[in-house]
Image (cartoon, rainbow, N blue to C red):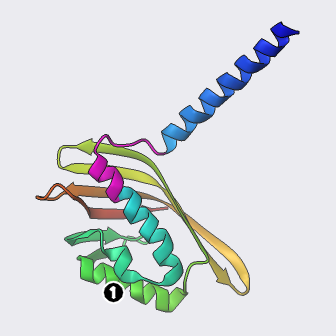
């Protein structure tokens, strides 16, 4: 009886380790606390702002000369223009009913960092929830004060 119990405990422990390893692979910290904080804040603010229509909050983490490349390849240059683009998008498409960001990997290379992952936006269309998903690559740049801002953001199919 004790032998079966011990095996069960070992199986549960092994399964837990596998789950924790999988969870770590999804959102591995970069090793730079300021970068990790900036990514968490920007992604959290984005999720909320998509539901409230706050284009300024979405554009806030971008550098003044940032470039946003949409899924259609259209480039928007500069934080002010990125904010304007999101404002127009909200007017055209409405607010999101649900939003999710999965930051899967962050690689730091000097004063640049590369965040990749995927996201989903759910909107009501003709009374039904429709979800669009895409992958992304965000290039973060360390600023003179040590804080991190988005330099490039590319949405991929």
Q: Position of residue 71 (x, y in %)?
A: 44, 69
Residue 11 against residue 77 in the figure, above or below = above
What residue is rendered at 23% in x and 69% in y?
66
Q: Residue tagged by mark 1? A: 84
Which corner quadrant of the image does residue 68 belong to?
bottom left
Q: For the point 15% across and 59% down, which residue is it?
A: 143
Residue 130 point in image, percent of width and height: 67, 74
Q: Is residue 33 left or right of residue 9?
A: left
Q: Is residue 37 magenta?
A: yes
Q: Nearer the viewer, residue 79 or 14?
A: 14
Q: Residue furthest left?
A: 144
Task: Report x, y in % for residue 99.
Answer: 56, 69
Give, as a single range, the part of the protein colored magenta: 27-38
Question: Could you say where residue 139 lies in the image, as x and y percent from the top left?
Answer: 29, 56
The answer to which of 15 and 2 lies nearer the viewer is 2
Q: Residue at x 71, y 87 (%)?
A: 126
Q: How many marks?
A: 1
Residue sticking out furthest to the bottom: 91
Whether the magenta-drawn stretch holds residue 75 is answered as no
Q: Residue placed at 46% from the left, 77% from the top?
A: 49
């Amino acid at each position: 009886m004790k032998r079966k119990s011990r095996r069960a405990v070992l199986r549960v422990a092994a399964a837990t380790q596998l789950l924790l390893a999988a969870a770590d692979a999804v959102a591995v910290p970069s090793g730079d606390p300021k970068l990790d904080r900036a990514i968490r804040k920007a992604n959290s603010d984005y999720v909320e702002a998509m539901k409230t229509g706050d284009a300024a909050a979405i554009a806030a983490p971008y550098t003044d000369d940032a470039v946003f490349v949409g899924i259609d390849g259209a480039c928007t240059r500069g934080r002010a223009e990125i904010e304007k683009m999101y404002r127009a998008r909200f007017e055209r498409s409405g607010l999101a009913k649900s939003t999710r960001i999965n930051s899967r990997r962050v690689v730091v290379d000097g004063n640049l960092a590369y965040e990749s992952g995927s996201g989903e936006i759910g909107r009501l269309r003709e009374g039904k929830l429709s979800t669009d998903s895409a992958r992304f690559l965000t290039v973060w740049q360390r600023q003179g004060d040590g804080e991190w801002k988005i330099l490039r953001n590319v949405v991929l199919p």
